[in-house]
Amino acid sequence: MLVAIPNQFIETFSEVRLAVKREDLIHPLISGNKFRKLKYNLIQAEVEGQQQLLTFGGAFSNHIAAVAAVGKLRGFKTVGVIRGEELAMQIDQNPTLRLARDSGMQLKFISREAYRNKTSPEFITQLKQEFGDFYLVPEGGTNHMAVKGCQEILLPADAEFDFICCAVGTGGTISGLINSAFPHQKVIGFPALKGDFLTEEIRKFAAADNWELILDYHFGGYGKVSTALIHFINDFYLKTHIPLDPIYTGKLVFGVLDLVRKKYFPEGSKILIIHTGGLQGIEGMNLRLQNKQSPLLITNV
């Protein structure tokens, strides 16, 4: 089933027209690209007769939160393999892990060294010996079925736009957008991670060349934020009533608006920004910011 999300226009610049597709409004916990990525994976799990989902993630993972929530909603048992053994003693202080646990997810904490080998056949065999059979959902949710779900983000009405902009984590969302973009459209990705290794990942799922990655707006790398970014996100919310998360969409929108100022987009362009959710991570980020005595993100979202 297609989910029709209205586009919210932002009257910010006279030379271009900006709109945000509010995928974050799909569901409070299974929102944005997480809903899209899980849709066909859940169907496949049911086809295979699986009753348990297992996946991987970090301390404040949107993916972990979404898999736990969808498991509770759809009647799957869920297991989350979490990076960082020390987090086992911090569940009650961590809003994401607490949510996952309270949704019924079993949490297995492993060292960062072990986590690097999490997809090895030997480790998967060990997990099946410990938890029984399961349907494996990759970290971040990206596989061919996830890309299929993300291809449904763009609808026929979105043909009016010239540029489609999205944040990039594991590459699944942008791959789906590349595959479903209209012939005249260009898809621009804003990686949340430092480095240019994502190009090859995207090419595993998308063959077209109608896209580009802009590598200048990661703010130091995954999970890194600055005071300037926090102020930007808060100001944007006060002006538009659109909440952004600091890991993905905050950096995305900052980058798009900066490129508008730099005349990257031709005059008269229509630009669609894909809001991929991730708002559950704001509470966890504010705990980190509070410990650093930094400005906090507005939370009345």
Image (tube, rainbow, N blue to C red):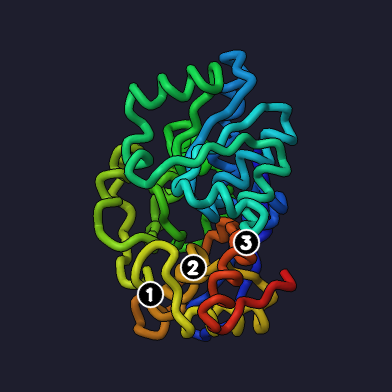
Q: What amino acid type is highlighted by mark number 3? A: Leu
Circles 2 and 1, Cβ within 8 Å, touching? The answer is yes
Q: Where is residue 121 in the image (x, y as percent from the top left)?
A: 34, 22
* Placement of the C terminus among the 4 image quadrants: bottom right
Q: Is residue 171 left or right of residue 106?
A: left
Residue at screen point 33% across, 55% down? 211
Q: What amino acid type is highlighted by mark number 1? A: Phe
In this picture, is 123 found above or below 199?
above
Residue at screen point 54% across, 40% down? 37
Which residue is tagged 2?
A: 271
First in sequence: mark 2 or mark 1? Answer: 1
Circles 3 and 2, Cβ within 8 Å, touching? The answer is no
Which residue is tagged 3?
A: 279
Residue at screen point 35% across, 39% down? 114
Q: What amino acid type is highlighted by mark number 2? A: Ile
Asked whether residue 256 is in view, the answer is no
Between residue 98 and residue 208, name the one nearer to us.
98
Q: Where is residue 193 in the image (x, y as percent from the top left)?
A: 35, 60
